[in-house]
Amino acid sequence: MTWQPLAVPGAYRVTQQVFGDPRGAFLEWFRAAELEEVTGRRFDLRQANLSVSAAGVLRGVHFADVPPGQAKYVTCVAGAVLDVVVDLRVGSPTFGTWDSVLLDDTTRDAIFVAEGLGHAFLSLEDGSVVTYLCSAPYRPSGEHGVHPLDPELGIAWPAVGRDGRPLELVLSAKDEAAPTLAEALSSGLLPHADDVANFVATLG
């Protein structure tokens, strides 16, 4: 596998090596040793999640309090999604910057999202299955969101799905009610870059 840094520091695109033959395909989609070598930090697997989404379902932008935060290693095992990471670390030189990776069942690519970053994805096909390994368990009181359609973020969500048909975006009630980036910043909801850096340093 090959790791490529994204425009948001702490996030990487992982290009997989897929071995195919007449029977199908095989790949090693996660290697802890490579993650730790590339990122210079430990990844303690504490929870594994799986979601199934219809075309147009938009999940995020989600983030967790730091510490402990929640780093994620994400892939799409069926269908296709546009996976987006956003720098929500107050004081970061790239604060508010986003980048994206197409995750699908053809390339089998993955994305790594470090603590303090926002994460979201848009399903481009009915039945898209996304799996993510998490460094910390889900804690409802420490989980937050920023509205994925906030014009200040300016995320370029696709207008059409994998089959070329227009997408009708579907958000959860919680994501619909999420604050804008400016509102989250003014309320003190967002993680601070120094706090994130200090916590991640303990994982070296």
Image: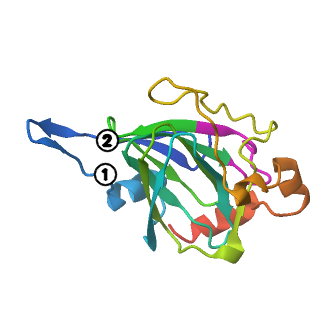
In space, the residues marked 2 and 1 are separated at their CA atoms by: 7 Å
Q: Residues within 10 Å of mark 1 (few under 14, many from 20)?
A: some
Answer with mark 2 or mark 1, whichever residue precedes in sequence: 2
Which residue does the numbered mark 2 point to in the structure image? 16
Say how the picture is coloured: rainbow
Q: Residue furthest right?
A: 186
Q: Is residue 59 left or right of residue 44?
A: right
Residue shown at 66% from the left, 60% from the top: 63
In this rendering, the count of numbered labels is 2
Asked if residue 190 is positioned above or below residue 76 in the image, the reply reads below
**Residue found at x 38% / y 41%:** 109
Q: Is residue 121 visible?
A: yes
Q: Nearer the viewer, residue 199 or 24?
A: 24
Nearest the eye: 45 or 84 = 84
Give the quadrant of the N terminus: top left
Q: Magenta region's main secondary structure? A: loop
Q: Is residue 68 left or right of residue 79?
A: right
The outermost residue toward the left is 22
Q: Are marks 2 and 1 in contact (CB under 8 Å)?
A: yes
Say which mark, if any, is on residue 29. Answer: 1
Say which element carries label 2: loop
From this view, report whether residue 93 is shown above or below residue 28: above
Q: State which region is magenta.
A: 87-99
